[in-house]
Image (spheres, grey):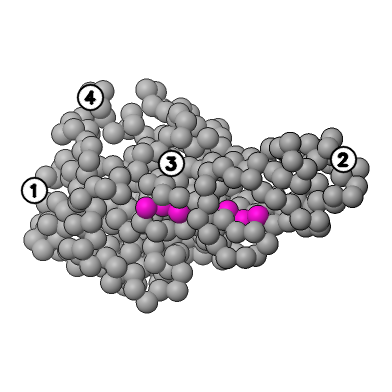
Amino acid sequence: MLKEAETRCPLVDAASEPARFVAERYEEPKLWQLREQFRLDEVIAGTRSEFEQIVALGNWVADIIRSTAGRPPAPHEPKPPPFDAFYCLSLAPHYRLHCTHASIIFVQAATSLGFIARFTLTHHTAEFWSNEWGKWVFIDPKGSIAKGAGRGAIYFTHNGVPLSALEVRRFYYEGRWSELEVHPEDARIEGMPDYPDLFRRVAFLRRNNWFSEPYSPDYYDPNSPRHIFREAVWWTDEHTPPRLGCFNISQEHVFNFPVNFTQVALDYTDDLGVLQVTLYTFTPNFSHFLGRFNEGEWRRADHQFRWQLQPGDNALEVMAVNKFGRWGMPTRIVVHFDSQRCSRDDYRKIATGERVV
């Protein structure tokens, strides 16, 4: 029988409308230029985990933004900047940068390192997908501008668990803001009294392929059909009505669609004790699958293969790997097989996940 199936993500077709997300292609030359020119591998060197790597990248951006304080505004203002990290970084030696610059730089820098990041319209901040936690995590790569605040990008946890923008928003509306754990600890966001209000509305842009498909110059013209808000996905509930002319979502598992996970479909074959395994994934810049049986070595796996069961418990683990070499989240399945007691009808039930009595 199917004894155990473990995955931290709901079964959602993340490639469908309106949750469809388009990431910049691995083959985009500007990604590699950004990574090499600004030595981003050195920025995340010395960290112990994927999560720490992404936070280190956010801290790098926050340091850049902080270094521009007191300088004159950029030439493009009051209009927003192009969604191009090279342009934003070229301003840093001479002009003051703000939240929009910070989030553009962070999203494209994270993408160049093989992470999944999206630009959020919670003011202008970002989220990244954490394989460690199996969720989207909010980050403000601008850092704190409060007087006397410490350095570093801002993110929130509750009982040690990192939170998405939507989860932070829930604390805001439930009057539980004081329960949030703010990082860095000396961010002093109480010195920014309007900061919690940023979470009144939450939305994200459905793509980050801004190098290969730049936004048109009128992307912030409210009269343009190409206005950036029309491309965003907006959260709606009893606190925030739908935004006219935009994609609106009220299902959290769709709004915070999972990536880098692997779904497993089992089917029976004509051979007793052999299952047909089919793998599915939504992994931007997907390269290949890895799999292993019974805690053995990880090996490259086809998207479809036959699984020879042995008497007793049989464990299968699979995961997706992207073209940058980043591993996704593992999915684990355990099937108990008794060749003496298992009829062909029972065997069919094993493959379909039904209970065998």
Of callouts 3 and 1, the N-terminal one: 1
Q: Compare residues 137 and 192 and report the one nearer the observer.
A: 137
Q: What residue sits right under mark 1 in the picture? A: 75
Residue 42 at x, y percent in the picture: 28, 72
Q: What residue sits right under mark 3 in the picture? A: 202
Q: Which mark is residue 184?
A: none
Q: Compare residues 304 and 155 and report the one nearer the observer.
A: 304
Of labels 1 and 2, the one closer to you: 2
Q: Quadrant of residue 216?
A: top left
Residue type at mark 2: give it.
Ser
- Residue at 24 percent across and 53 percent down: it is 31
Of callouts 2 and 3, the N-terminal one: 3
Q: Which mark is residue 343?
A: 2
Residue 322 at x, y percent in the picture: 41, 52
**Separation (CA) of disc 4 from disc 1:** 22 Å
Marks 3,1: beta carbons within 8 A: no
Residue extending farthest front: 271
Up the image or down, 343 lies above or below 333; here it is above
Q: What residue sits right under mark 4 in the picture? A: 224
Taking the image as drawn, is residue 121 in sight? no
**Separation (CA) of disc 3 from disc 4:** 22 Å
- Residue at 73 percent across and 56 percent down: it is 314
Q: Which residues are magenta?
A: 316-323
